[in-house]
Image (cartoon, helix red, strand yellow):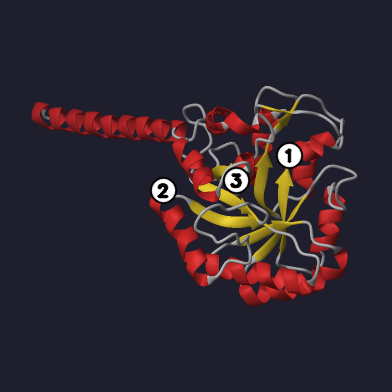
Amino acid sequence: MKKSGLLVFVGFVMIAAAALLFSFRQDNRAGTTDGGPAGGPAEGRPGGSLKWKTGVALYSFNRFSFEKALDMADSINANYVEGFFFHKLGEGFNGHSIPALNDEEIAKMKGMLDKRGLKMRSLYADGKTEEDWKANFVFAKKMGLEFLTGEPQKQHWDAIEKLAAEYRVKIAIHEHAKGSSYFWHPDSVLMAMKDRPHFRACADLGHWVRSGLDPVKCLKMLEGKIVCLHVKDLDAAGNLKANDVMVGTGVLDYPAIVAELKRQRFDGYVYIEREGNWDRNIPDVDHALKFLDRLNR
């Protein structure tokens, strides 16, 4: 081979090697964007960052008007909020409560959310009759909700399934503590879901622990059926009178919980529900959002 040809060949090899090295580095960087180590799992795979939608349950701010509660959520850069049907909404709503708002009042509610860049995709609802539940679904449809969260009585399950299909709004079964609700164990939630394709689960992590259940095992039982989480922490497990504490400072093993959610590739809604320090719990909710964000990196 002539000298000039050899130089060309060597140059070609060097360019190819440089291209491979650049590609390797780019892949490594991509592996770190989801919070895992370089070369680790890519986003969307087990162990990668969750594409969950984080926010706050407005019940955390239940001592304040709807507009004030939105201001509080907005002050900590929450993206999503979940309303609750017995909220005393305050001025501008004529003493009406959800879901008894008229179209003008619903438009006002939407305007308050839009002004702050907040999205409300669900509402904690209740009903004593089928007509009550129909009113909930009518409101949900007008409000643009994706689902209602609640603990419906067994005699209403079939009617609610029909309403959910008609209005294209799902129902997420919420679990309260043992003794406070029929729905305290995933078994009862799965029973309600049977042959009802519009039924889903709202996993209340704190109430599971209050009832003496392992939240990771509960999440596994409801895999693929969970649309939202209620996030809280407690000072004791298996104690129905356990106190609510700041997320990450209590007995719930959130690293294990988040690891399980990553395995399931959970991409639903995550609502911080701080049931304590009622008059000044904005820093507590802010802490919880940031705590979850760190675990999700």
Q: Horizontal and vertical percent for residue 176? A: 80, 46
| Whether residue 222 is situated above or below residue 252 in the rendered picture | below
Residue type, numbered disc 2: Arg
Disc 1 target residue: 205
Return the disc, 3 or 2, that comes first in the chain's sequence. 3
Q: For the residues labelled 1 and 2, say whether their Cβ atoms are less than 8 Å apart.
A: no
Q: Nearer the viewer, mark 1 or mark 3?
A: 3
Name the residue at 50% across, 39% down: 72
Q: What is the distance, in whole Å, between disc 1 and disc 2 at their CAs?
A: 28 Å
The residue under the point 26% across, 34% down is 16
Q: Is residue 239 left or right of residue 262?
A: right
Camera-nearest residue between 9 and 89: 89
Q: Residues within 10 Å of mark 2 (few under 14, many from 20)?
A: some
First in sequence, mark 1 or 3: give its number: 3
Q: Residue at x 72, y 54 (%)?
A: 201
**Tag 1 near tag 3, CB within 8 Å:** no
Q: Which residue is mark 2?
A: 116
Amino acid type, callout 1: Leu
Distance from Cα at disc 3 to Cα at disc 2: 15 Å
Q: Secondary structure at mark 2?
A: helix
Q: Is residue 131 left or right of residue 116?
A: right
Position of residue 28 relative to residue 55, above or below, is above
